[in-house]
Amino acid sequence: MLKVENLRVNVENKEILKGVNLEVLPGELHVIMGPNGSGKSTLALTVAGHPKYRVVGGRILFNGEDITNLSPDERARRGILLAFQVPPEVEGVKIIEFLQQVLVELKGMDPVEAYDLIVKKAEELWFKEEDLHRYVNVGFSGGERKRLELLQAVLIEPKLLILDEPDSGVDVDSLSIISRKIDELHKRGTAVLLITHYGRILEHLDRDDLKVHVMKDGRIVKTGGGELVERIDREGFSEIFEEVGA
Amino acid sequence: MTETITMSDAKAIIENQIEELAKRNKEPEWMTRIRYRALEAFERAPLNDPVISEEELLHFIAKPEIKGLPENIESLDDLPPEMKALLDRLGISEVEQKYIAGLAVQTDTGVIYNQFLQEWAKRGLIVLPTEEAVRMYPDLVKEHFLKLFRVDESKLTAYHTAVWNGGIFLYIKEGLKVPFPLHLFFLIQESALAQAPHIIIIAEKNTEFHLIEGCTAPILVRHSLHLDMTEAYIRDGARGQLTVLQNWPEYVHTRPMTRARIGRGARFINTTVGLGTGKSNVANPKYWVDENGYVELNGILLGQKDWFVDLGGEMYLQGKGAGGINASKAVIMDESTVITRGIIRAEAPKTKGHISCDALLLSDRATMETYPGLVSKVDDAELSHEAAIGKIREEELFYLMSRGLDEEKATQLIVKGFLEPMLKDIPMEFLVEIRKIIELAVSGGM
């Protein structure tokens, strides 16, 4: 489904990704771990098409199509959704109107039908109907922002959901609902690419099912199964890096 | 300009129009005298307009009607095709389209008033064309007409006063609260006269009203200069709202002149929505605020094409505890120029004022200037200002696009969101149209 081939990416003329290879098959759940600055978020933002992240080598394929040069909205239309690490505030735009428009544009839904669906799904992520009349992310706590990202994922039901640290800056209760929603989406067939620092978000997920990649300095240096998560939790990254000579 | 109009030509034309108006309106002599006083002042009054020169003004006076429009519009099919297309795109009903095209409006009185308002008239709400009010309520009009302006302040005030025609007289009896917004939309399409409606609002003590003037849809105007004057008297404890919707065609210069006196503990919210500002739009409304009174000027400005917009706003906080807010949000596109220059003058103790100006620049060929002015004559006033001029943030645009909205739709959403907080008091039926017009403007479709 997603195939990243020898991807090299520059941000403001600095090379951040130095040749990343990754393949995610339909329905798979991949986890990318690694220390700060290893290029995890860059990978996520590049796959989603952020204009600041310039591909200088390699390519990104989605369902066999080269999407390296597509705009973010065209990627979204093909089924890719990125849940942001720090979703921006959009002043004056009400959540409900934004989500309605997204569902109308992306899924061809009728606005009234979309409204009802949004209210229903929002409740599952602890948003009351009146919360939906707030502006997108404006004055939101960390937990609220991440829950709103998950709400969008649940509504859009992408083919590939990329989550950039859905567990950072989140309270314990929000973490548990976010984790459960990821599991729910995964079970319904969404392929997931999850970026995280630590394993707690994975508690609700079936570890045997995971493919785990460890990044360092713009490369994936080790790939393994769920056992890698426990090992990193226990030992940190340094032993792994030593082992692979990275 | 093919021929030169001299000052004496212009004065002769104005004099003829005064005579014609006096006769047509069966005007009492005192009003005609005011017109003549204005004519006299016209020559010596200064003209401080950043766009219109004296030569141009004299030309407008001689030929107020613009050329190139269809002579007789008898049906919507006679409209210029671009305008018809725009009305269709906005989804405006045929009845309303007729209004906009001037088909449903009589030449001498364009004020919409119906049975509903007649019912309210019994309770003390007077809504009349200003000409009729002059005849029916001479004392009231005399007491309030041209009391907030001086006839010789500028050539534009003098010209307006000499030939004013049309407009609304709104009177609200003490204690009366009008629970619904009054939407008054007037168009006078008499080609030989200038567009110079005069609006008088008298909200007696402890009244409430919301007057919405104008129209969100683009209007087929036959004049290249629009000079309206509004005088509002918001008495003690009254709460008034005046929302002005403007969507002028690109050949019109507009010079709205608005002034209000706000009584003790009274509140006046003046919102101007400049969807289409016309070729140039220069306004410097003034407000005098008494003890514990409050005034708010909200400006929503869409700068498009090569248009020039200059919105001032002077607030005189004259009574203890008076307050004022001058807030504007401008979206600046194409090669337009938008200037905002509010001034708040604290002249009494414990007064508070705030100026805010936000601008979103969508084009690097457009210009935004803002000059906030705070003047304090007392030591315990609280005056502040903030201004921010910026582009659309890349992160926001990317966020919306990553949800499947293309760049144009994402930009439209951000622009609508930017203006949204300023549109809080505007009824839904207008909002829908306003949002659509913003979308079209952002996409360059106006």
Image (cartoon, coloured by chain):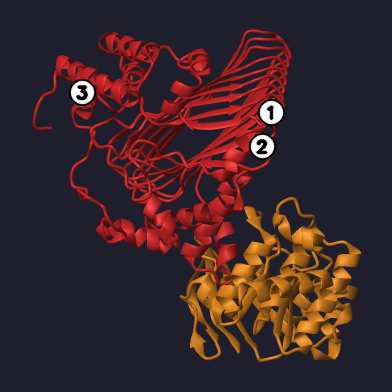
Q: CA distance from mark 2 to mark 3?
A: 42 Å
The quadrant where residue B212 appears: top right
Residue appearing at x 64%, y 63% in the figure = A97
Helix, strand or loop at label 2? It is loop
Kindly report which numbered mark, 3 or 1, lies closer to the viewer in this rendering.
1
Q: Is residue B72 visible?
A: yes
Indicate the amino acid at tag 3.
Answer: Leu
Q: Answer with left or right where residue B100 lies relative to residue B435.
A: left
Mark 3 Cα within 10 Å, few/some/many (few <14, many 20+)?
many
Q: Report in which chain the residue with disc 2 lies.
A: B
Q: Earlier in the sequence, mark 1 or mark 2?
A: 2
Label disc, if present, on residue B58 of the rendered structure = 3
Write down which chain is painted red.
B
Q: Is residue A50 above or below residue B204?
A: below
Q: Earlier in the sequence, mark 2 or mark 3?
A: 3
The image shows residue B414 at horizontal and vertical percentages of 55, 55
